[in-house]
Image (tube, rainbow, N blue to C red):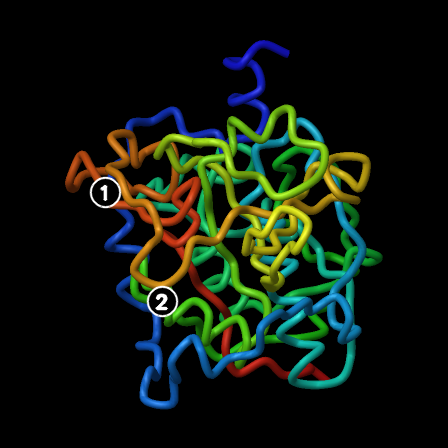
Amino acid sequence: MTKKEFKEWIGRGYNNGAENMRAARENAEQPDLSNHVSVEALPTSLDWRSKGVVTPVKDQQSCGGCWSFSAAETLESHIAIQTGKLFVFSEQEILACTPNPLQCGGTGGCNGATQELAFAYVGQAGITTEQQWPYEGVTGTCDWKGKSPVANITGYVFLPQNNYTALMNSVVNIGPIAISAAAEPWMSYSEGVFDTACGTDVDHAIVLEGYGHDSTVNEDYWLVRNSWSASWGEQGYIRIKRYGDGQEPCGVDKTPGDGDGCKGGPKTENVCGLCGIMSDSSYPIGGHLIN
């Protein structure tokens, strides 16, 4: 693929000039930062895959629905941590049913939306399994006939943007976190700690599964789950260089409509972390099963 073709394939489908996500974040719960500790007091490494709460890597195919995968995968881990039951949830339900009246991150479905909108929808309707509602790779229609939700949440939290300590504490104490990044340069990634400049055009939704240190190259990293199948990267994962508290690179995203923007609002957004990885972080709360 050319870079342009690749960007169109990975993105959430943002082609409407959307610019600001503030409205979609108004319903988020405020994070409790009172129990956060210094980064030095946290474990030196973390991988939620080792705790039995992470499902196998998935493939979004040609649909610009990475936001639905990021949300579903984060929900899977959250429900597993809260209930002890690990489900494979339906991205297709989220794609087909999540309303997007403000056109946040796109016009909905394979044409884009955001993880926060997905969490808000699931809080109202619940989430069913991949087995009940298989992935089609297209937006499809919201048809619940013959299906039923198996789990639900009470809300979701949006973390302070570009806050290293908050993100580190949250992935340790809460679980996997739904995040976003400028992913176009990941086109040729195969292995190792990715430390190449990404730019600041945040355009792809993924999941933060942990962090660690690679002694071979002496670099800290974020452990990120992608939705481009297990044949990409390190069995579907990428390790992004992590610089540390107060040392993460920052820049200005001049096209926030490529990421999590809604219609109207500022035309720029400050993003920090390599690939803007700390700019958009959220997670569900109050996970429970539906009997």
Find residue 40 and report its horizontal and vertical position in percent. Answer: 44, 78
Whether 61 is drawn above or below 151: the answer is above
The kind of residue on which mark 1 rests is Glu
Q: Nearer the viewer, residue 250 or 137?
A: 250
Q: Above or below — where is 154 with respect to 194?
A: below
User: Would residue 32 appear left or right of 172 to someone viewing this image?
Assistant: left
Which residue is painted at 50% across and 13% down in the image? 4
Task: Tell me the crowding category of disc 1: few under 14, some 14 to 19, or many 20 or more residues within 10 angstroms, Cα based.
Answer: some
Mark 1: secondary structure: strand
Residue extending furthest right? Answer: 131
What residue lies at 23% left-to-right and 42% top-to-bottom? Answer: 269
How far apart marks 1 and 2 lie (CA) works out to 15 Å
Closer to the N terminus: mark 1 or mark 2? 2
> 226 or 109: nearer the eye?
226
* Above or below, comparing residue 235 to residue 280 in the picture: above
- State the residue position of label 1: 269
- Dot label at residue 61: none
Image quadrant where residue 29 sits: bottom left
Taking 33 as reference, is 267 above or below it? above
Identify which residue is drawn at 35% across, 78% down: 31
Q: Position of residue 57 (x, y in %)?
A: 76, 49
Left or right of residue 103, residue 209 in this image: right
The extreme left residue here reads 266
Q: Quadrant of residue 148?
A: bottom right
The answer to which image quadrant residue 126 occupies is bottom right
Q: Position of residue 230 (x, y in %)?
A: 80, 41
Residue type of the residue flagged with mark 2: Leu
Judge the density around disc 2: few (<14), some (14-19), many (≥20) Cα neighbours within 10 Å. Answer: many
Q: Which residue is mark 2?
A: 159
Q: The residue tagged with tag 2: helix, strand or loop?
A: loop
Which quarter shows the C terminus?
bottom right
Towards the viewer: 37 or 110: 37
